[in-house]
Image: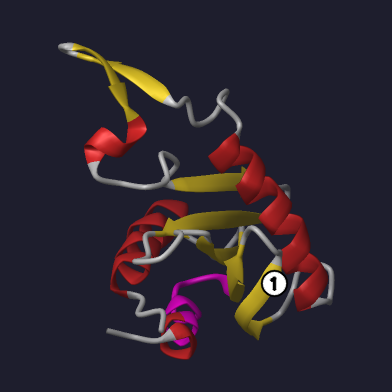
Amino acid sequence: MPGIDECLLEAMVLPGARGAAVVEWTSGLALGTVGDSPNGDHEVTAAETAELARMAAEHTAFAPPETNGPTGPTQQGDAGKGIPVEDVIITTRTGYHLLRFVETTFDSSVFVHLWLDREEGNLALARIRLQDLAERLALI
């Protein structure tokens, strides 16, 4: 299982990867970074993306506390996952930002942020690879 540094280095191998970070979304702190930052400052980027991640994970418009299954309402914990949101994708004129939530044994408040160049990046491939990395990421 790769640690934070290994995970980030694997993410940077993706076509078009400009930068990556592992961020704790409740505090906005970057646990690790590699490559460039969209605004030139990894810590500011971590805080800004954490705000977006918190909104997606906590607001019921994006992550309703209940869903209607085939047998009626179910609680989000019934599916065995702590966070009902898998990832957030932001597209800009020049790039893609993928925020992939990481399931952890503690409070699951970590995500991987990958910044891709729009011309060189492959959004579908990056999403699949980021999912795999997030599942294998070992947080100690």
Relative to 108, residue 55 above or below: above
**Residue at position x 40%, y 64% in the image:** 130
Q: How many marks overall?
A: 1
Q: Is the N terminus in the top left, top right, bottom left or bottom right quadrant? A: bottom left
The residue stretch that appears in magenta: 8-17
Relative to 116, residue 72 above or below: above
In-image side of 116 versus 127 (left or right): right
Relative to 19, residue 109 above or below: above
Residue matched to label 1? 29
Q: Is residue 4 magenta?
A: no
Given residues 64 and 20, the one toward you in this image is 64
In-image side of 80 versus 138 (left or right): left
Q: Is residue 117 visible?
A: yes
Percent of width and height locating residue 41: 83, 76
In terms of image quadrants, where is residue 31?
bottom right
Q: Is residue 94 visible?
A: no
